[in-house]
Image (cartoon, rainbow, N blue to C red):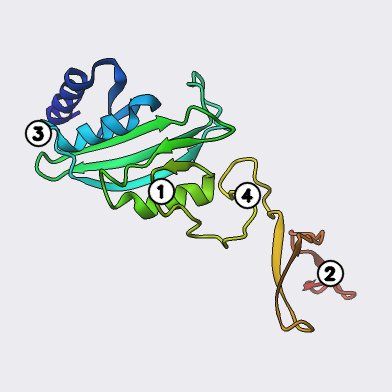
């Protein structure tokens, strides 16, 4: 691994001590942040002149409930951010596990990087992670009256509610999901003369 990223890991250890757990990964470095110091660490990652992570490139939610690669930390939900330092030419992946699985809440990093605004809305919409202090936390990819959070591992594949157009009411109506049983493997039936297969 490049000595540049080894230097980054050393600086992270010196700057944050035990509040982050840095390690080298392909193409950069990774840190795990404890939830109580999440916002403070993210702000220091941007403002510390030795680090200078000026850009938040991405932020997403993760559901580890079906993750089968032990050993594993406590917690089902995590927020993962991809940070970039243009001036230092460093990349950093920062992950923070949400403390409460039943009510996942983390502070918003919009005051630190304004680009987090839509990323946090997406994580809220798809995973149900609430970002306190966001200011405009509403659904961004699903309907406002959508039930549930579709990227959670326990969300049913067909969903809870379906939308369809009702020609009698001349509008879109919502109702329970109706999934017809069907065979997904194509069935081939030979003709009477056995010359070749025909689609049934």
Dot placed on the residue nearer the N-terminal end, 4 or 1: 1
Where residue 191 appears, as percent x and y from the top left, is: 86, 74
Circle 2: element type: strand
Q: Dividing the picture into quarters, in which one does residue 152 lie?
A: top right
Q: Nearer the viewer, residue 149 or 144?
A: 144
Query: Looking at the image, which residue is at 48% across and 21% down?
Result: 73
Circle 1: element type: helix
- In this rendering, does residue 38 appear at all? yes
How many angstroms separate mark 2 from mark 4 (CA)? 46 Å
Dot placed on the residue nearer the N-terminal end, 2 or 4: 4
Dot placed on the residue nearer the N-terminal end, 1 or 3: 3
Vertical comparison of 169 with 79: above or below = below
Q: Counting other residues with Cα less than 10 Å from the Cα at mark 4, is it few (<14), some (14-19), or many (20 or more)?
A: some
Dot placed on the residue nearer the N-terminal end, 3 or 4: 3
Circle 3: element type: loop
| Nearer to us: label 3 or label 2 | 3
Residue at which label 3 appears: 49
Dot placed on the residue nearer the N-terminal end, 1 or 2: 1
How many angstroms separate mark 3 from mark 2 (CA)? 74 Å
Residue at which label 2 appears: 190
Vertical comparison of 13 with 51: above or below = above
Where residue 114 appears, as percent x and y from the top left, is: 28, 51
Tag on residue 148?
4
Vertical comparison of 73 with 131: above or below = above
Q: Counting other residues with Cα less than 10 Å from the Cα at mark 3, is it few (<14), some (14-19), or many (20 or more)?
A: few
Does the CB distance between marks 3 and 2 fall below 8 Å? Answer: no
3 left or right of 122 in image: left
Residue at which label 1 appears: 120
Q: Nearer the viewer, residue 169 or 57?
A: 169
């Amino acid at each position: 691994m490049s000595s540049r990223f080894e230097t980054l890991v050393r600086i992270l250890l010196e700057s944050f001590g035990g509040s982050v757990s840095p390690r080298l990964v392909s193409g950069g470095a990774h840190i795990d942040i404890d939830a109580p110091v999440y916002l403070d660490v993210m702000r220091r990652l941007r403002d510390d002149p030795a680090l200078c992570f000026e850009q938040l490139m991405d932020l997403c939610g993760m559901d580890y409930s079906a993750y089968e690669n032990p050993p594993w930390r406590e917690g089902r939900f995590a927020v993962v951010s991809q940070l970039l330092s243009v001036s230092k030419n460093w990349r950093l992946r920062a992950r923070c596990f949400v403390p409460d699985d039943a009510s996942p809440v983390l502070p918003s990093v919009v005051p630190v990087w304004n680009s987090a605004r839509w990323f946090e809305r997406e994580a809220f919409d798809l995973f149900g992670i609430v970002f306190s202090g966001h200011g405009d936390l509403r659904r961004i990819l699903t309907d406002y009256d959508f039930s549930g959070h579709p990227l959670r591992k326990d969300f049913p594949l067909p969903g809870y509610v379906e939308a369809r157009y009702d020609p009698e009411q001349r509008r879109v109506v919502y109702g329970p999901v109706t999934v017809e049983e069907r065979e997904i493997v194509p069935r081939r039936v030979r003709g009477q003369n056995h010359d070749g297969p025909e689609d049934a």
